[in-house]
Amino acid sequence: MNIDSKVVTLFNEYFARIKENIVTCGKTSMSVKLSDSSFAFVMNAGGGKISENKVQTVIIEQAQENRDIERHRIIYCAIKDANAVIHTHTPYAAAIGKTGKTIPALLDDTAQIIGIDTRCCADDTANISKILKKRKGCIIIGNGTITHGRTLDEAYTGCLVLEKAAKCFINANLLGNYKKIPYIEAVLMHFIYQKKYSKANQNMLKNKQVTDNTIEIEQGVIDSGEAALRRQVVDAGKRLLNSNLVQGTWGNISIRLDDTHMLITPSGLDYLTIKPEDIVKVNFNTMEYEGKLKPSGEKDIHAMLLKSRKDINVVMHCHPNEGSAFAVALLSMPVVSAEMQSCVKGDAKVSKYALPSTKSLAHATVKAIEGRNACFMANHGMLSVGVSIDEAFECCQVMEDSADKYIDAKAAEYDPSGNTAEEKRIDAFYKMVSLKMK
């Protein structure tokens, strides 16, 4: 069967994104379902572009001698809504695989997209398919990670989130503590995400079209000032995504429009496909909004901060790799540098835990950021504020750099060798696991 050039283009797009945003230490394979009876499979050992002749068409009902292909095939057989699969190799997940430990749901994005926990399993198709029936990804002991999704984008986001979960678990152990999301709440988060939150985004990606929000910027329905602010928000979302400060549709951004309105990112749409007209205009006094798209579920946090703090115009919420460890360790980060003091205005506190998109979380976050320009949100992520998009984004980066330096210092206490920072953290984790097992 001839492979559509669009499939090859899609594969190359996500191989490029993996190469740019995920540190891999081995080959990567991808597949997408072509029909109810077949899928397209490709293996990429070097991370470069693949050509059409490298892509194979595989019949789902026919067992494969090639184990790499068979792993993909068995997922399509076992999981009805799986339309894409990615198998790759990443360092922190590999480290967890060596210990065989289960990563509990520490972060809400992991609970939402992966499931109630992240399991390690033996490299056989029966084990893999059994675990993945209730999860979107798992760690294969000695052989990387495998994720599936309704689109290739969802499977790719699963790769990002799974490796971040592994890194966060290791880093939180180095910080000395972690708090799990309650089991029932993790189940609820996963259910809501699969059934509701991600539906609009996955349908949009599958159909390759952006939802019409009935606002025509080019035709002059809104003024040029608002149009410029909308474009700033769209560009900021791409900056967060390209900096790996968010994964998939997580995180949110708002900017003050006037004394009563803010512009905020919509709920559940991908940053790469959002257009200026998709940004939602919200009255932060009444919370009424314009257009067909719903504003971010964390709109209450943005509204409360923009109303109470006249010194800021932008609120930015992200899900960073390094800072998330403080969010799950429930540990405030002390001032690490003069840059952090200048930007954050002091140490970075952690809010009390609350479910996402609730007023409880909004109140807890507003309290945690009092007198500061950034804070951590328990089991959730990080939030920064600023006079401008650039200022809030810089604050996110300074927080992430500070967290990175602090965790590196903690790892060096366990492993003072000349290894790389990554190796120090992983070796320190192995020592901690070994001590706990004695």
Image: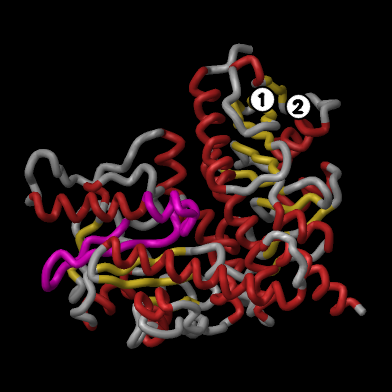
In terms of depth relative to the viewer, which is nearer, 349 or 303? 349
Whether residue 332 sits left or right of residue 226 in the image: it is: right
Using the image, determine if residue 251 lies above or below residue 238.
below
Q: Which residues are magenta?
A: 238-265
Kind of residue at disc 1:
Ser
Whether residue 212 sits left or right of residue 432 in the image: it is: left
Report the number of numbered marks.
Answer: 2
Q: How is the image coloured?
A: secondary structure
**For residue 99: magenta?**
no
Using the image, determine if residue 334 lies above or below residue 315.
below
x then y, percent, for residue 94: 76, 54
Q: Which residue is mark 1?
A: 37
x then y, percent, for residue 337: 46, 77
- Asked if the residue under mark 2 is in contact with the one under mark 1, i.e. CB atoms within 8 Å, the reply is yes
Dividing the picture into quadrants, the one containing residue 65 is top right
Closer to the chain start, of discs 1 and 2, is 1
Kind of residue at disc 2:
Glu
- The quarter in which the C terminus is drawn is bottom right
**For residue 262: magenta?**
yes
Name which residue lies at 56% across and 71% down.
405
x then y, percent, for residue 191: 56, 60
Name which residue lies at 35% across and 35% down.
209
Q: Which residue is mark 2?
A: 61
Dot 1 surroundings within 10 Å: few (below 14), some, or many (20 or more)? few
Whether residue 405 sits left or right of residue 374 in the image: it is: right
Dividing the picture into quadrants, the one containing residue 217 is top left
- The quarter in which the N terminus is drawn is top right
Q: Which mark is residue 190?
A: none
Numbered disc 1: secondary structure: loop
Name which residue lies at 52% across and 42% down.
153
